[in-house]
Image (cartoon, grey):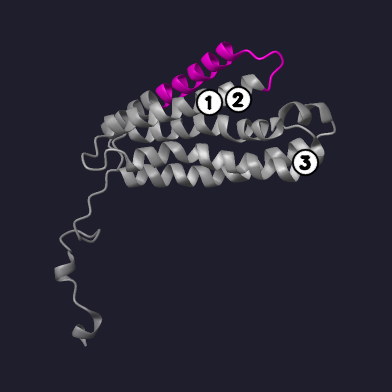
Amino acid sequence: MLEILKSIVYGGLNEAIASLSIVASAASTDTATLNIFVLALANLLGGLFVIGHNLWDLKANQVDSKYKEVLGNKDNFFFHAPVAILSFLIFGLVPPLVYGFSFSHSDDSDLKIAAVASSSILCIILLAIGKAYIQTPPKYIKNVLYYIVIGVGAAGVSYLVGDLIDKLVEKLGWFNSTVDGSLPLPHLTMSTVKPAWESW
């Protein structure tokens, strides 16, 4: 039971914070809901390679005490890895799913980000309690406050930086595209271009 909890905490805690930060930064730029959902999902799937590498690296480490502290008995690696990866996926999916499907009628981004923050902080609290439980001695209040501060701080900074960069890029006029069906030649539009066979 203890090793299951360790694997859940290992896979889920950091990703819950990272996924919240990604959704917060994307939401600060008034990006479409679908784009935010896809961006967070793509980041989550890309992160599978990272957590897979980290788990394998932890197993390959010659110092068994580190693995035991984080996950438990090294002989149970093929039990720990799937649980950690599943936890990574579940807790990483919470922010994009909540953002994508909450307040779908109004599509109010402020309400959506508030719902994401609330659900993510709840997940972080549960995982921080789990992390405190597997420590000796357990320090529940310190652990919970520590990870809440990290989660809120990371999401807040991501939101603020995303908003500032969005305003800067808009002010500089970068990435502005105007698609009007015209060709990049002066006074030449699609209506004035004749197909090749008409000139024969």
As measured in the structure, the alpha-carbon distance from the residue carrying label 1 to the one carrying label 3 is 24 Å
What secondary structure do most residues of the magenta stretch adopt? helix
Q: Which residue is mark 1?
A: 126
Which residue ends up furthest to the front in the rendered image? 1
As measured in the structure, the alpha-carbon distance from the residue carrying label 2 to the one carrying label 1 is 6 Å
Q: Does the magenta-highlighted stretch encompass residue 138? A: yes
Q: Which residue is mark 3?
A: 76
Asked which quadrant contains residue 11, the reply is top right
Q: Residues within 10 Å of mark 2 (few under 14, many from 20)?
A: many
Q: Which residue is mark 2?
A: 130
Asked which quadrant contains residue 182, the reply is bottom left
Q: Quadrant of the C terminus?
A: bottom left
Query: Is any part of residue 28 visible from this angle?
Result: no
Query: Is any part of residue 141 visible from this angle?
Result: yes
Q: Is residue 41 left or right of residue 28?
A: right
Q: Residue at x 54, y 42 (%)?
A: 89
Q: Is residue 168 left or right of residue 16?
A: left
Where residue 137 sits: x, y (%)?
70, 13
Q: Residue at x 46, y 26 (%)?
A: 122
Earlier along the polypeptide chain: callout 2 or callout 3?
A: 3
Q: Amino acid at mark 2?
A: Gly
Q: Up-down: is 200 above or below 180?
A: below
Asked which quadrant contains residue 141, the reply is top right
Q: Up-down: is 96 above or below 179?
A: above
